[in-house]
Image: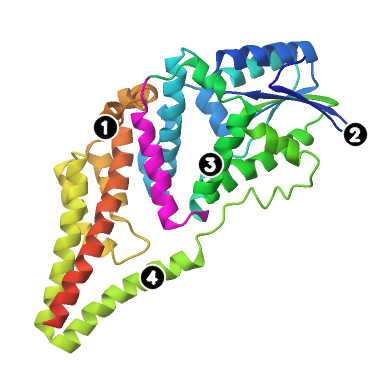
Amino acid sequence: MNHRNVHRLTLPDKEIILVGTAHVSHESADLVETVILEENPDAVCIELCQARLDAIKQKNKWHETDIVKVIRDNQASLLLSQLLMSSFQRKIAQKINITQGAEMLRAIEKAEEIDVPIVLADREIRITLLRTWRKMRFLSKARFVSEMVKSLFVTEDISEEDIEKLKQQDVLELALETIGKKMPEVKTTLIDERDQFLAHRIRNASGKKIVAVVGAGHVPGIIKNINNDIAVDDISSIPPPGMGSKIFNWGFSALIVGFFIFGFFYSGGRTGVNMIFSWSVITAVCASIGAVLLLAHPLTILASALSAPIATLHPLIATGWIAGLTEATFRKPQVKDFLALTNDITSVRGFFRNKITRILLLIAVVNITTSVGTFLAIPVMMTLLSR
């Protein structure tokens, strides 16, 4: 089949028909169906991992989410990131009246119809997000989060023609080049590594003829890597937190405690007590402001305030986690929140109305305002020392 988004790759042991799609396009879903039925492949590869497939196929999958376990396992930011990205894509899908991931579902349907294996070719979304986060510097993380939050405010004037433009090769290359210049850490893990992973999975799929359905942005990278030996284990692991981050976190805590001790010995017990008091009040107030902004339960606000002075001095504890656990205890998400989650993530109002997303936002906001409090408290303590 001749089509600008169908690429035929001939390898020594197999033929690969690479179909580049826009994930929310009517034309893409129809193209996928046509290619699979015409080519009658031995296997169909799709750009999904098991978690993303479940999210598309099992609309009630969110019902199984244990929000308390998510917080305890330190997965709140990961879940919030997934929901924000899903929100952006779902809004576009609703705008042009097509099911999110329709082309992937169509590929699965047609593969089952001709009775051939389906290969989930993408890297697990959790690994991708964690590798992205761990490799980013602090400013890049702040920028990344702000860009995701901005997706909640996307305007509604997106046409299907605009979506189809995303499949033009020159536009994609320009977009990837722009991403690479602005945030190289994001491009490496979100695009380059996944290009390699996808190429490896497609190259090693069983059969002589393979149809692979992937986002159009991955097509150039897959073609580039299809004949390369990929160290897939290296790009499938989650790197541990950087040693520099650990040193900074523990060093920062030691520095603050050192200030307190120095205050007692250098300026006397009264100054030391005043320094501790100032630290406690400022961090507590800032933490409680974050909880108030999210209209948290009164006991959540209190828990945030009480925990902040201690949590800010311990790298393994975050005030936001305590706030989230407290809120989940007193305002536990109900069945209706899980049922409404799919629609609520498409609007700012829905994000704040739904108890699940509000708890996730609460954790993020309280952590941010508490961090602000720590940097406000330091100059105050320095002033007390200089008296």
Please name the residue shown 46% across and 57% down the image: 137
Callout 2–callout 3 Cβ contact below 8 Å: no
In the drawing, what numbered circle is on residue 381?
A: none
From the image, give the main secondary structure of the stretch colored magenta: helix
Q: Is residue 37 visible?
A: yes
Compute the Cα span from label 3 to label 1. 32 Å
Residue 313 is situated, as x and y percent measured from the top left of the image, at: 29, 67
Camera-nearest label, 2 or 4: 2
Across and down, in percent, residue 363 comes to 31, 46
Crowd band around label 4 with a 10 angstrom C-alpha radius: few (<14), some (14–19), many (20+): some
Q: Which residue is mark 1?
A: 352
139 drawn magenta: yes
Question: In the image, 271: left or right of 247?
Answer: left
Tag 3 residue = 178
Give how far across and how far down residue 158 sits, in percent. Answer: 43, 20
Q: Which residue is mark 4?
A: 250
* Crowd around label 1: few <14 · some 14–19 · many ≥20 (10 Å): some
The CA span between labels 2 and 3 is: 35 Å
**Amino acid tagged 4:** Trp
Q: Nearer the viewer, residue 98 or 62?
A: 98
Residues marked 2 and 4 touching at CB (< 8 Å):
no
Residue under the image location 56 percent in, 22 percent down: 165
Residue closest to the eye, 108 or 39: 39
Q: Nearer the viewer, mark 2 or mark 3?
A: 3
Q: Secondary structure at mark 2?
A: loop
Front in this rendered view, residue 166 or 123 = 166
Instruction: Kindly identify which residue carries mark 2.
Output: 12
Query: Where does the N terminus fall, quadrant-wise?
Result: top right
Q: Say whether disc 1 or disc 2 marks the residue closer to the N-terminus.
A: 2
Q: Nearer the viewer, mark 3 or mark 1?
A: 3
Category of crowding for the residue at label 2, using alpha-carbon neighbours closer than 10 angstroms: few (below 14), some (14–19), many (at least 20): few
